[in-house]
Amino acid sequence: MLNTRFTELVGCSIPIQQAGMGGLANPQLAAAVASAGAQGMVSVAGLPTDLLAGILDNLRKETSGVFGCNFLIPFVGEEHREAVAVAASRSRVIDFFWGEPDSSLVQIVHSGGALACWQVGSKTEAVKAAEAGCDLIVAQGIEAGGHIRGRIGLLALLSEVLEAVEVPVIAAGGIGSGRAMAAALATGASAVRIGTRFAAAAEAGAHPVYVKALIKAAPEDTVYTEAFGANWPNAPHRVLRSSLEAAQAFPDDIVGVATNIYTNQKRPIRRFDAFAATALFTGHVEAMPHWAGESVVGVKRLQPAAEIIRELSGEAEDLLRRWC
Ligand SMILES: Cc1cc2nc3c(=O)[nH]c(=O)nc-3n(C[C@H](O)[C@H](O)[C@H](O)COP(=O)(O)O)c2cc1C
C-alpha cells in the first residue's frame, strides 16, 4: 500500500484526493471515492447551512471512508462562514480555492475539528497558506482542468513548493495515469488530486455529451483561456477547444437550462457561463464549458470511481516498486 504523510494525516488508505468539481463533485461520487479508500470531496460553496448539514449527515451514512468539502472563495461571503463551520464539524478536510489564504477561515475549520486544505498556484501562495495555518497544500500546475491558479508546469511548481513548506503537499494538474501519479509521488508530493478522470466517473453524473467529448479528446485538444467568464470573470481555466469553438459560434445569449442537483431549481445558462454540465442540463451542451486537464489522455471510457482509483494507484504502486 502507498502510505504517505497524506494517508496518515487524513486517515485514508490511498493517496488520492478527489477534486471539488461543482455539480459533478456530488455526494454519490464522494461516497464512491471514499469507500474505495481515497479521499472524496463534495462541492458545497453557496449551499444553505441546513441543506448542507443534511447532505453531509446522509453522506456519513453512505460511507465510513474519508471525505471533504470544497469551497470556492469568490462564492464564500461573510454569510457563508457558518457553512464552513457546519462542514468542518461533519467532514475530515475543508478545501479552499481561488483566493488569498485566510487564517480566520482556517481557524473556523480547526474549531470544527477538520483539516484545512488550500489549493495554490505559486510558491508565494503556498507559503501564505502555510502561514495561515493550513494542514495540507495543493500545488496546481497549469496542466489542470477547470479553473487554474497555476501559471507554470506541475513539476516546476512542486519543486518550488516542496522546498518552501513543511506541510504535506498534494500534486494537481495533468495526472491521468498511474505513471503520472507515480512521478508526482516520486518528487515528494504526499498525494495527487484528480479532477478530469473523476469527471468521467459514472457517479459524477456528467452530461453524456461532455463525457463523450472527454473520451475522444487528447491533451492537445485542451486550451487555456478566460473565455468562460460570464459569471466568473478574469479566471483562467482549461477546457476542450471544441466547447470553446462551439460557444464562440453559438448565435444566441442562452445556451441551455441547468437544474440544481440538490434543489431541482432551474436556471438559464448564458453563453460563456462557467458551470459543469451534469446529465440534468438541457440545451446546447456542446457549447457549455467542457472542463478538462491534459490528464484527459487517461479518459478512455465512463468508469466507476473505484475502478479509476484501482487503476491509478495500482499502476503507481507497481512502478514505484520497480523504480526503487
Ligand atoms: C470539471 C472540473 C471542475 C472543477 N471545479 C473545481 C471546483 O469547483 N473547485 C476546485 O477547487 N477546483 C475545481 N477544479 C480544479 C481541480 O481542483 C484540480 O485542480 C484539477 O482538476 C486537477 O487537474 P486534472 O483535471 O488534470 O486532474 C475542477 C476541475 C475539473 C476538471
Image (tube, grey):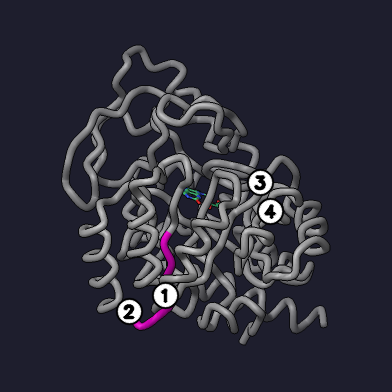
Asked if the residue under mark 4 is in contact with the one under mark 1, i.e. CB atoms within 8 Å, the reply is no
State the separation of the CA atoms marked 4 and 3.
Answer: 23 Å
Assess whether residue 68 is covered by the magenta stretch. yes
Asked if the residue under mark 3 is in contact with the one under mark 1, i.e. CB atoms within 8 Å, the reply is no
Q: Earlier in the sequence, mark 1 or mark 3?
A: 1
Which span is picked out in magenta?
64-69
Q: Amino acid at mark 2?
A: Thr
State the separation of the CA atoms marked 1 and 3.
Answer: 25 Å
Indicate which label's residue lies in the foreground, 1 or 4. Answer: 4
Q: Give residue 79's position: percent from left, percent from top.
A: 33, 47
Q: Earlier in the sequence, mark 2 or mark 1?
A: 1
**Residue in the picture at 32% in, 79% down:** 63
Q: Give residue 111's position: percent from left, percent from top.
A: 45, 71
- Give the class, few, some or many, for how many residues have Cα within 10 Å of label 2's Cα (few <14, many ≥20): some
| Front in this rendered view, residue 304 or 18 | 18
Q: Quadrant of residue 62?
A: bottom left
- Give the class, few, some or many, for how many residues have Cα within 10 Å of label 4's Cα (few <14, many ≥20): some
State the separation of the CA atoms marked 3 and 2.
Answer: 31 Å
- Give the class, few, some or many, for how many residues have Cα within 10 Å of label 1's Cα (few <14, many ≥20): many
Q: Which residue is mark 1?
A: 34
Indicate which label's residue lies in the foreground, 4 or 3. Answer: 4
